[in-house]
Image (cartoon, helix red, strand yellow):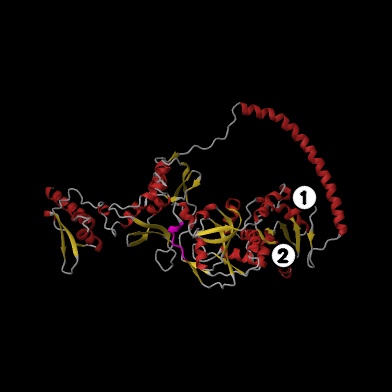
Amino acid sequence: MSNKQECTFTSVAPYPKVRQMAHGLKDGDYASICKAAEMMADGIREMAAGRNCVLVPIPNHRGRAIYTKTLANEISRRTGIPTWDILSCRPHMPLHYAKKNDLKPEGIYLKLNLYRQVPEQFTPIVIDNVLDTGYTAGAAIKAVGHPNTMLAVLGHTKNHLTNKNYQFNQLATNMEKKMQEQPSDKKQVKNKTDTPLAVYQRLKSKHPDALILMRNGDFYRSLNEDAQKVSDTLRIPTQRPKAKGEGELMAEFPHHALDVYLPRLIRAGNRVAIADMQELGKKQTINQTKNQIQTDTMEKKTEKKKTKTKEAKVDKTETAKVDKTEVKAGNKKEDKAVEQSEGQKVHKPREPQMVTVNGEKVSHGHAFQSNQDPNKWYFTARLDGQQLRPQLMKPEDVAAYQKREIGVEALMQTYYPTKLAKKVTPEEYKADNKLSDGRVIEKMVVYKEHDEQRQDVGKYKLYTQVGEQKMSRTMSKEDLNAYFDRVTTPSKLVEKNFGEQLHLASFYNQFRLPENAGVKEVRIAKSQQGDWTVSADLGDKGVTSKAVLSWHDKQSLFTLKTVTKEQLAARYLNTEIKSMAAEKQTQRAAMKV
């Protein structure tokens, strides 16, 4: 018998089939949210049949439910199930960061808080985007604390089968078949003359004083200047269409909301014309309301006759043009064949400018000048086709690049060193969790500080636990790049950043006295104030000042004996020792003169 807690969930389809919509949902795209709510509504109705349910959106990594709350509200409008935003959590690292860096989600501290208890007579349905490992969903189910809690998501993967604490049982629905049968916008557009923009312009030319609404699948859409009017009147967001044939600006809302939004548009003084995009190439049917455009049947007949005669003329002229062009094309085919046979240029992929030790190809490496500040230059490149973030160049590198004294390989080594270093395998990364003194790193996490009361808010920090000792500090740019590019290991990061707190001998090995400095003796003594100090005797060059040792240095020197007196003198007094030695040499040179 399994000890896992069982949870019923419903999903539209496996994640690969809804990947694009899931990304739009996470980005807060209103159209994607409405489409996802429309698809999820049927499964949630089946799940909630015979129960008093509430929708509980899951908070994101910043601590509050944002796009999931909007999704729950849209589902609520379609199903009548109320939305309760009752969950929150502490800001934490996004789970996709953990997956990208081969970290387990269990390593991220995730605890959700419940603002309001769900009564026993209600059944909570947790709303989320995708069910993957089930780590976030499990934390939400645990926080809600209701024995009959269910889950509704847009997509799912098979990774939830590996969850050790929860067994997610999918509710059998016909939503996936419905999604496959649903026609897409791309299939509806047959040719350039039937694009949404072409239909809109054709209708606008006939009815310039009307606001055009076009039915496209489950949505009503308005374009360009009409989209701005719809957005201002109904207070819905506008967006930039991806395709050129969809205009410059677009606003849309679900078809079932027409009964609510249409009276608002009319009361605002607009004349509204509604066209059905599903009948492109056929007769354009325009639904009219009391204040809509009134057309005369006699005018329609005359317009049809005129258009038929025009189309007949156009067909004749086009056929004549086609005949002429076919003759010319026939004469040119032989010429083109000869050109190709004689060695016409064939497009070849660009050769990489260099190949890293990991086999990744570097291309498009170049320096460019800033548009805002002409004195600033940036270097960038592509790594296996992925654009790297531009890096501000040093003035000497800019001059060398302009004179062609420096190449892409040298610039990559200067500005992207971790991209060129040998990557650590996941097995090596997980295995290297011991310090040089044998202690084991129990936990190491990289996270982004979200507490606005802290001075380092918005910066990445490194947290580690060694035994009972817990430490954290802000990461440098070099360490952060090495971590995300996977060219370092936990032991190297911990020893570099926390070597002093852990009193490691490897930390003190970097400190050495300068050669030929003439240090005869290093003294460790206790001052009258009770502080332990270090000083160096340089013989005839004099004695340095006394530097106070830190608590960690005293522990390393007296208790753990992981540091020597000479290393402490080098750490605190190297600058003074070098200056005293240089001063003595100048005095001797002056006496000789």
In the rendered image, the vertical position of residue 481 relative to residue 137, given as above or below: above
Q: Is residue 526 left or right of residue 114?
A: left
Q: Residue at x 50, y 46 (%)?
A: 386
| Secondary structure found at label 2 | helix
Three-letter amino acid code at the position of disc 1: Gly
For label 2, the crowd category at 10 Å Cα-Cα, with few meaning under 14, some 14 to 19 and many 20 or more, is few
Q: Quadrant of residue 525?
A: bottom left
Res 589 label: none
Three-letter amino acid code at the position of disc 2: Leu
What stretch of residues is rendered in magenta?
A: 105-111
Name the one closer to the observer, 408 or 106.
Answer: 106
Sequence-wise, the earlier of marks 1 and 2 is 2
* Residue 208 seen by the camera: no
Res 281 label: 1
- Give the image location of residue 23, x and y in percent: 57, 55
Q: What residue occupies the far front of the structure in this picture?
A: 1
Q: Is residue 43 left or right of residue 274?
A: left
- Give the image location of residue 243, x and y in percent: 64, 51
Residue 78 is one of the magenta-drawn residues: no
Res 258 label: 2
Q: What residue occupies the far right of the structure in this picture?
A: 298
Measure the alpha-carbon separation of dots 1 and 2.
24 Å
Q: Is residue 385 left or right of residue 208?
A: left
Name the one closer to the observer, 517 or 256.
Answer: 256
| Secondary structure found at label 1 | loop
- Give the image location of residue 113, x and y in percent: 49, 69
